[in-house]
Amino acid sequence: MKKNFITALLAGALSLTATSAFAQAGTGHHVDTVKGYVSEAIKHAKEALAQAQQGHAPETATAARAASAQADEAAATENAGMDIEQAQNRFTTAIKAADKGDAAAAVAPLQESITLLTGALDKL
């Protein structure tokens, strides 16, 4: 009887530990996945910056939207930091400027977003 009780107690403890581990694993995003999102956001942001510096507003907006989408993916994870959220705000500013045809006004926010995302990548 005592042996059955100990066995049941041990089995219950192991069950709770395993359930907790599986629950945690299901909600997390691997850091490499987040780094991938941030790296892609930086790549698109650099393209948007190049387009803005050349005065191509529509292309700037398109590339900035692609960068923003990748930053959104990164921000949706628990590994996201304030730098990513701040970069998203800069993308919004750059997109609005480019949509109005003012590529020059998108340059500074895009430069800031690249700096912020690079900082976020270094912290991951």
Image (cartoon, grey):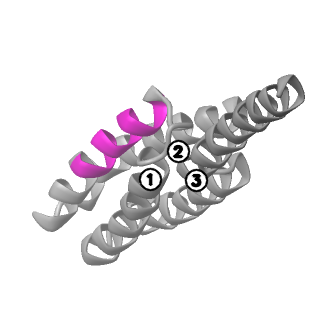
Looking at the image, tell me whether mark 1 or mark 3 is earlier in sequence order.
Answer: 3
Vertical position of residue 115 compared to residue 68: above or below? above
Q: Residue at x 52, y 44 (%)?
A: 114
Q: Which label lies toward us, 1 or 3?
A: 3
Which numbered disc covers residue 114?
2
Q: Give the distance between the C-alpha atoms of the residues marked 1 and 3, in whole angstroms.
A: 21 Å
Label 3 amino acid? Gly
Q: Residue at x 44, y 27 (%)?
A: 82
Q: Give the distance between the C-alpha atoms of the residues marked 3 and 2, in whole angstroms.
A: 31 Å
Q: Give the distance between the C-alpha atoms of the residues marked 1 and 2, in whole angstroms.
A: 11 Å
Q: Is residue 100 magenta?
A: no
Q: Residue at x 75, y 35 (%)?
A: 8
Label 1 amino acid? Ala
Q: Are marks 1 and 3 in contact (CB under 8 Å)?
A: no
Which quadrant of the figure contains the N terminus?
top right
Q: Which label lies toward us, 1 or 2?
A: 1
Q: Are marks 3 and 2 in contact (CB under 8 Å)?
A: no
Which quadrant of the figure contains the C terminus?
top right
Q: Nearer the viewer, residue 48 or 70?
A: 70
For label 3, the residue is: 26
Residue 118: x %, y % from top left: 62, 40
Residue 90: x %, y % from top left: 32, 42
**Residue extending farthest front:** 1
Highlighted range, magenta: 83-92
Q: Which SS type dominates the magenta stretch?
A: helix
Tell me if 85 is positioned left or right of 70 in this view: left
Pointer 1: residues within 10 angstroms few (<14), some, or many (20+)? many
Pointer 3: residues within 10 angstroms few (<14), some, or many (20+)? few
Tell me if 95 is positioned left or right of 16 in this view: left
Q: Residue at x 27, y 61 (%)?
A: 103
